[in-house]
Image (cartoon, rainbow, N blue to C red):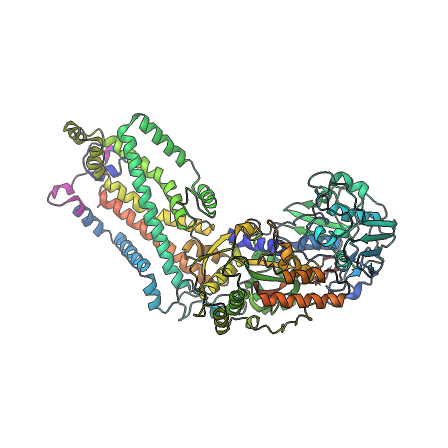
Amino acid sequence: MRRSFQWTLILGVLLALTLGVAACGGDDGDDGEQGTTQGTPAEGKKGGKLTALWTDDVDNIDCGISYYQMGFQVCAATQKALYGYEPEDAVNAVPDLAEAAPEISEDGKTVTVKIRTGIKFSPPVDREVTSADVKYAIERGFFNTVNNGYAGAYFGDLVGAKVGAKPGTEISGIETPDDQTIVFNLSKGTGGVVAGALALPLSAPVPKEYAEKFDAENPSTYGQNQVSTGPYMIENDASGKAVGYQAGRRIHLVRNPNWVADGDFRPAYVDEIDMPQGNDDTTVASRKILDGEAMINGDFSPDPAILKQVVSRQKEQLVLQPNGGGRWVAMNTTIKPFDDPDVRRAVVAGFDREAMRLTRGGELIGDIPTHYIPPEVPGFEEAGGLEGPGIDFMSNPAGDAALSAEYFKKAGYASGKYEGSESILMVGTSEGVAEKAALVAKENFEKMGFKINLKLVTQDAMYTKFCNSPPAKVVICPNVGWLKDFSDAQTYLDPTFNGDNILQTGNSNWSQLDDPELNKKMNDAKLVTDPQERADAWAEIDKDITNLAPAINWVWDKTPLIRSENVNAQASAFLGQWDLAFTSLK
Amino acid sequence: MSTGAGASDLLHAEDSGLDQMVRGEQAVAARSPLQLFWRRFRRDKVAMVALGFIVFLIFVAIFAGPISRLFGAPAPNVQQTAALDDFGLPEGPSSEHLFGVDPIGRDVFARVLYGAQVSLTVAFIGTGLSVLFGVILGTVAAYYRRWVDTIIARALDVMLAFPVLLLGLGLATACSGEDGCVGGLIQPGLSVVIAIIVLANTPYVARIIRGQVLSLREKEFVEASRSLGASNRRIMFRDILPNLVAPIIVYATLFIPANILLEAALSFLGVGVQPPRASWGDMLSDAVSIFDVAWWFMFFPGMALLLTVLAFNLVGDGLQDALNPKSTRSN
């Protein structure tokens, strides 16, 4: 019992999380008419308490640190980042704290944003937000006490920015000519991606005079004492201590008294949001939600048995939300025999990816990829859409033994199967559906003649000790995956397949694909600022990656979200989760 | 302690004491103790049925492959996605899959059969090794007394004080690294389970044996042997040990089911037999989460485990009665 439930829980969290994570959440803003979302009635009922069941905690309650879908979900309700996303549009960010779209200079080296007036911090800070607060928010992402996980990747080209800086270090590249203007000066022309990253919670303003003392501690305790700018805030006491957050037990959001509804794109219907954690038995938790005892699911996904029940009996209580993520079985391209692209192509061709998908619930949980960029991310259509670019070995989801044999022959194995006898190390996750996937993967490799030494460890160890660590020399990682950070293909392909991003620890280029030509193409594409050109450039890169077959890409995820009958819940395409600020009670 | 000769009363020396004297059956002097024992055991119908089941189980474990083929079942690790529905949920018992399939499409019938191999291997090897070490330690400690006894007995007390399951979890985790532990002797999987069983059982066996030997070493036949100049080793293993056969057999039989359960528990907790190898405990643990939609996945391995443990317990009781006719169930 314990094991099974535990895993599901860890899945909920870690999958998304460790996988890469981050769908971020934005809040955003602009003037708002609340009715832009179609799924919910334009006018939801105001008031009431929303209950979301969680199994585990967020990675960090600090919106400047969190790099996890669920953390982003909370931040989307509590903070105003510069930009955010309407629930149904994960591609076009709308201004939130910002007043209008960012201005990117011709050379892509300067990004200018105007921010809105009249936005106030929640108590106890109670003052108006200025551009300096956004500057500090981004600066603190580089502090060694904060260590934001994506600051370096997206804001690293800011003039004077250095990851791991001492608390208090300013970044000369961020200028604030007046209280409403912020200018980002970059050393390279990466303005396109910087502008996109301004929809991540890191850009939510932080009051320096208040946060300084917390950021001086290591690790920073600002998260436990945070102030909000969004419609909600974590319940706090007079001194600002976030008493509504009890790690591993509960997150409790209440209305932010200083929030100005006028001009915010979020309707923020409910008065209070309660997120009790520790609901380890996800079957029970799912039932509670479906039966109306709780309202929406938080960080876990209902398991296949529940899905089946919902689909057959309570279909309207289920939303399958594409989350801009995918899962794959990574083959280490630096280790024989997977250094040979034809062996990898043979494996992809012969792999039964439908069996992999069945481990998580079958067709419901997503399409089987024909290339890499997932649906809802710019470049997806350009790269061939669902149909794909027509690469033969990616075309048969159930596996094509004949084609696989052909590629094996091309690689020099006359029998049409792998002929080596060495034992190949595969490290998978010992928990729940991930374990099932690992076992299915092992079986598939063995079918093609490989001798697999499968080692099952916890999800956490699988990543930190093995798959994220090239010195561990793991050959196959069957349980890895990635979620976009925001709607830009770079955030999906660059960390995972760019050879320049291979790290000795914390690596997420699990295939260790290091193709100089490909790396160069990616580094060039980062400098493209025009959205359509970016999409085209990354689609082209996507084709090259697909053709190199570094991994067996077996699902473009949809997150199954369930709700009770007494809520009008709204899913956010950007978060791949429910959008708390758009959900109302019936 | 009792003064009667022979094995049977010694069996209960620890708990029943002086009144357990052997008489009656001794009148038929022409029969060997083994024959006597067998005559008595045969009369116990329940134990005989249980013994029959164990023999059957051993047969099944040895011939798991041919038997599952005979019933048209695929090999235990073959995944048949055709036996899963659109949601990836397994199908129940059918003519094709007698016991249904598990959530990745493996045949439960074949896996239950192969699971018997694991259970029995663990049970016999684990128990055998515990008995071997326990007998040696217990005999040596009791025979030499003094400091040897002090060291061994105290060490055993310490081992007894360990919470077995926690120790097992810790050991399994420690040994699940790349190279196992104890210089690679203990690898993750079966050998970890066996090591845990040996650690858990040895002290019990050793304590019992020590108690028996303490009384036996004062007996006349031991003194006779000593006066004839026999070596210590000869006295311990040729004179004393044969008198311990009966208790050893009975305790071993009673340890076996406990060990099968321990293996199942460890596999259930995920630190026992490594997937994809079939183990009843591991199957049960996987089955918990989908019990309401796939009862067969829990029922069959559960029944197999239940019946096996029950059978060993009944045989154990039968043996105990047969070796000690004056105990509770004598007639």
Residue sitting nearer the eye, A36 or A356: A356
Find residue A417 and report its image quarter.
bottom left
Q: Is residue B260 left or right of residue A574?
A: left
Number of numbered labels in the structure image = 0
Specify start and end residues of the magenta stretch as a single range.
B18-34
Q: Is residue A100 left or right of residue A510?
A: right
Q: Is residue B30 magenta?
A: yes
- The quarter in which the C terminus of chain A is drawn is bottom right
Q: Is residue B263 visible?
A: yes
Residue B259 position in % (x across, y down): 37, 47
Residue A307 position in % (x across, y down): 58, 64
Residue B239 position in % (x across, y down): 19, 35
| Residue located 17% across and 46% down the image | B36
Q: Is residue B15 visible?
A: no
- Above or below, A156 against A451 in this view is above
| Residue located 32% across and 65% down the image | B66
Furthest residue to the top?
B146
Q: Is residue B246 magenta?
A: no
| Residue located 74% across and 38% down the image | A216
Residue sitting nearer the eye, A554 or A42: A554
Residue B23 position in % (x across, y down): 17, 39
Residue sitting nearer the eye, A15 or B3: A15
